[in-house]
Image (cartoon, grey):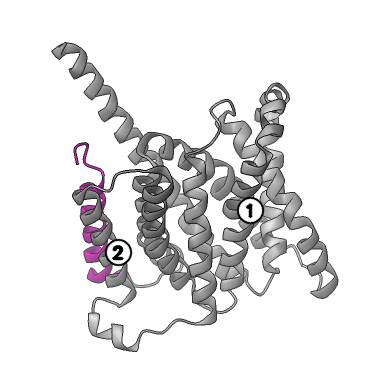
């Protein structure tokens, strides 16, 4: 019996570590999405950018999902309402709101506001709708992660909190975070008979179809988009990396860690964004960033302890 329990604990531990690795990797790749959103805000309209992103993602994942989609069609059809809401919250609303927000606020605000509020909302939603327990260590970890992100937002001086204000773009980002928190909760309820790859193919395709009328509207109301090498590379990055790869490994992490615990790894996005800004854009990387990273990593360690 003891040997059986030891093997069970070892398996649980392995799943936790795999989930942590997957969630952290998704956060790393996702962090580039906010930088691209800001960089392209004057080069392509928000719904068009989102439409091209998910069209590419749907095409890329199609060869891997076509057989599964055919064999699971009956279950997909039965679950269309669930799949519609997953596509609407995780694909359409979240990303469109981020891209709209990029027209009114900075890239760092887009990342910071989303990653501060979405994990908290996800934990609350997971508790209310999925009955996931919120142990005191998970709660402490969540608070520490939020403090770490806030420390970065306030440039290491909490006195700056007095002058902190939220723009229209910040409110778009907050709404996007709420939408993604709903998506995180929905993923945990995915029908068991629908495989992860098929699930992504369906919500990517549904999201693209929902975005189509908005894309057509922008074609008639915005100047024609000029496709430079920068724009093409950026769209491919978010279409393949920040979409197919990220969503697949993020959903796998949710399956291993739970919706609330996985969502906390979103706090790594502004940390990674800061590092990317320093390397790619040659912005300053200071002790403030290092301190913020240390606080966030401590919070993640607390929130992901095996026993709570």
Per the image, is 151 magenta?
Answer: no
Look at the image and tell me whether residue 1 can be seen: yes
* Residue at x-position 28% and y-position 27%: 12
The region drawn magenta spans 285-308
* Residue at x-position 59% and y-position 47%: 86
Identity of the residue furthest to the bottom in this view: 163
Assess disc 2: are there few (<14), some (14-19) or many (≥20) residues with their C-alpha within 10 Å of its C-alpha. many
* Residue at x-position 37% and y-position 55%: 124
Residue 203 sits in quarter: top right
Foreground disc of the pair 2, 1: 1
Q: Secondary structure at mark 1?
A: helix
Residue of label 1: 88
Image quarter in which the C terminus is found: top left
Q: Secondary structure at mark 2?
A: helix
Cβ atoms under marks 2 and 1 closer than 8 Å: no
> Residue 9: x, y in percent?
22, 24
Residue 8 sits in quarter: top left
Task: Determine whether, in the image, residue 215 is placed left or right of residue 170.
Answer: right
> Residue 40: x, y in percent?
62, 68
> Residue 134: x, y in percent?
27, 48
Q: Nearer the viewer, residue 236 or 187?
A: 187
Residue of label 2: 146
Assess disc 1: are there few (<14), some (14-19) or many (≥20) residues with their C-alpha within 10 Å of its C-alpha. many
């Amino acid at each position: 019996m003891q040997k059986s329990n030891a093997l069970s604990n070892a398996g649980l531990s392995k799943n936790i570590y795999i989930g942590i690795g997957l969630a952290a990797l998704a956060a790393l790749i996702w962090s580039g999405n906010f930088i691209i959103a800001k960089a392209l805000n004057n080069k392509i309209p928000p719904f068009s950018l989102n439409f091209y992103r998910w069209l590419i993602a749907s095409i890329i994942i199609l060869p891997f999902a076509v057989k599964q989609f055919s064999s699971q069609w009956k279950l997909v059809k039965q679950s269309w309402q669930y799949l519609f809401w997953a596509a609407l919250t995780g694909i359409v609303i979240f990303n469109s709101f981020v891209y709209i927000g990029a027209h009114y606020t900075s890239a760092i605000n887009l990342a910071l506001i989303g990653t501060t509020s979405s994990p908290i909302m996800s934990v609350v939603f997971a508790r209310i709708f999925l009955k996931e327990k919120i142990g005191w260590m998970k709660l402490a970890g969540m608070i520490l992660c939020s403090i770490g992100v806030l420390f970065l937002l306030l440039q290491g001086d909490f006195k700056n909190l007095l002058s902190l204000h939220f723009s229209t773009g910040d409110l778009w980002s907050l709404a996007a975070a709420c939408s993604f928190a709903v998506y995180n909760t929905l993923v945990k309820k995915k029908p068991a008979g629908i495989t992860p790859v098929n699930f992504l193919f369906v919500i990517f395709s549904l999201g693209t179809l929902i975005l189509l009328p908005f894309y057509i509207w922008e074609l008639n109301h915005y100047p024609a988009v000029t496709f430079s090498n920068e724009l093409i590379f950026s769209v491919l990055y978010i279409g393949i990396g920040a979409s197919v790869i990220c969503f697949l490994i993020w959903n796998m992490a949710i399956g291993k860690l739970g919706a609330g615990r996985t969502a906390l790894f979103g706090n790594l996005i502004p940390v990674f964004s800061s590092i990317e800004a320093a390397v790619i854009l040659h912005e300053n990387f200071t002790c403030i960033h290092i301190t913020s990273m240390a606080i966030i990593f401590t919070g993640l360690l607390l929130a992901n302890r095996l026993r709570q």
